[in-house]
Amino acid sequence: MTTAELVVLDPTVEPLPSDGVVADRPTTLDGLTLGLLANGKLNSVEMLTAIHDVLADRFEFASVVERNKHNASRPCPEKIIDELVDKCDVVVTSSGD
Amino acid sequence: MTSGQLSSARLEFDSWNEVVEGFMDRGWTDGLPIIPPTPDLVNACLEAGGRNPSDILATEPTKGRVITAEKVAVNAVMAGCKPEYFKVVAAAVEAMSEPQFNLHAISASTQGSAVLALINGPVAKEIGLNSGVSVFGPGHRANATIGRAIRLVIINATGSQSGEIDKATLGHPGKYTWCMAEAEDVSPWEPFQANRGFSEEQSTITLFPALSPIQVDNHAFQRPEEILVSFREAMFAGGGGWNQGEVVVVLCPEHVGNLERAGWSKEQVREFLHDSARRPIDEWRAAGRYIMDDVGQPGDELHSLNSSDGISIVVAGGGAGAFSCVIPLWSGGIGARSVTRLI
């Protein structure tokens, strides 16, 4: 379109490419440590408890780590993230409301 | 003078109307037509603001988007800003990237916060910002386009389009535009920026993550106590002191005149508003507020705000009419807090 009357600029900003990768999926949850991270909203803990109960009927977890970030509108504190990474094989998080 | 080349992708269209329709189709507007952001217009903004195109004004934290002066200028042109407004828009983008403003949360939240921009200092008159009649209404270019530019930056430079990142249940009319100046000539008190540690000669922008204004009508009384007690119910709208840290109170000239004649200071007004906006926990519950058991006993009184320091008092509005307002903030002004920055 070389005869265009108007040249204008793109107003958008692209996200930076993410270097994140999806973690390997376990073939079974038996013998693993399960992390449960609630976001602090009402019912987020109840929701995780229900999910835990369903999973616990089917798998034998080595242990369960329950944490609550207590503020749904803020990123999870690094300390909790580090602890979950350190202790858990899989983590389930929830956004109750 | 600015230097450096514009680096944004260039698009070609055959007509003005095709630009508008093309931008609409791409989701690059707020639903209203835009001014085509030609390189000349964008350069004029950058020149007026003394910025280079590659100057980084903000980095959006969740996706790492780097927001340059050029991108902000593109959006400012689209919004209809004059070049001399650009320095205000640029300062707004810097302010909204402060972590305490929690931009991602307020943009994405179902609670649907708008961004209220308050301008103080000499720049307000210099660029013709309205602080008077219909201060939140239409018809004032600087207010309308600066507020709109802030929203277009949020849409285009942070990816917060409606239904994408922006998941607001109801949204907010202030998301189209919401920018005001303080009526510093009318106010008997120090201007707002002085409450934030700046001098009266300095120009500042303060961004509030603001919910809907609640108008307070009191034509019946002249005594400060009789006027200010009518703010009580509006102060309750944002929640109780266990979860509310900040609120904006915009006082109209007629109310302020009565306060001035009685010799009240801004601090007295803050303290009265804070003190009067309290009620027993069981009344909070009766009004439909969820209050956890550990907050107190049912008969214990709970303030609307956790401190009078959290009340930002701003004087604005037309000379006729005794209508002020209370503006609660997103997440009670705790999950996100206002930011003041030098322009």
Image (cartoon, rainbow, N blue to C red):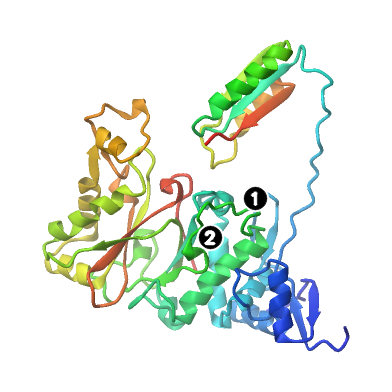
Which residue is pictured at 28% across the width and 65% down the height? B324
Q: Tag 1's secondary structure?
A: loop
Residue B312 image position (x, y, % from top left) = 34, 57
Q: In which quarter of the view is residue B265 placed?
A: bottom left
Inter-mark Cα distance, 1 to 2: 14 Å
- Residue A70 seen: yes
Give me the disc on residue B95.
2
Using the image, determine if residue A71 lies above or below residue B204.
Answer: above
Judging from the image, mark 2 belongs to the subunit labelled B
Count of number-bearing discs: 2
Where residue B159 appears, as percent x and y from the top left, is: 67, 58
Residue at 42%, 52% (x, y): give it.
Answer: B329
- Counting from the top left corner in percent of width and height, residue B133 is at 33, 78
Q: Identify the residue under disc 1.
A: B61
Task: Using the image as rendered, state which of residue B320 and residue A96 is in the foreground.
Answer: A96
Badge 2 local density, few (<14 within 10 Å), some, or many (20+)? many
Specify whether B322 is left or right of B82.
left
Amino acid at the residue labelled 2: Ala
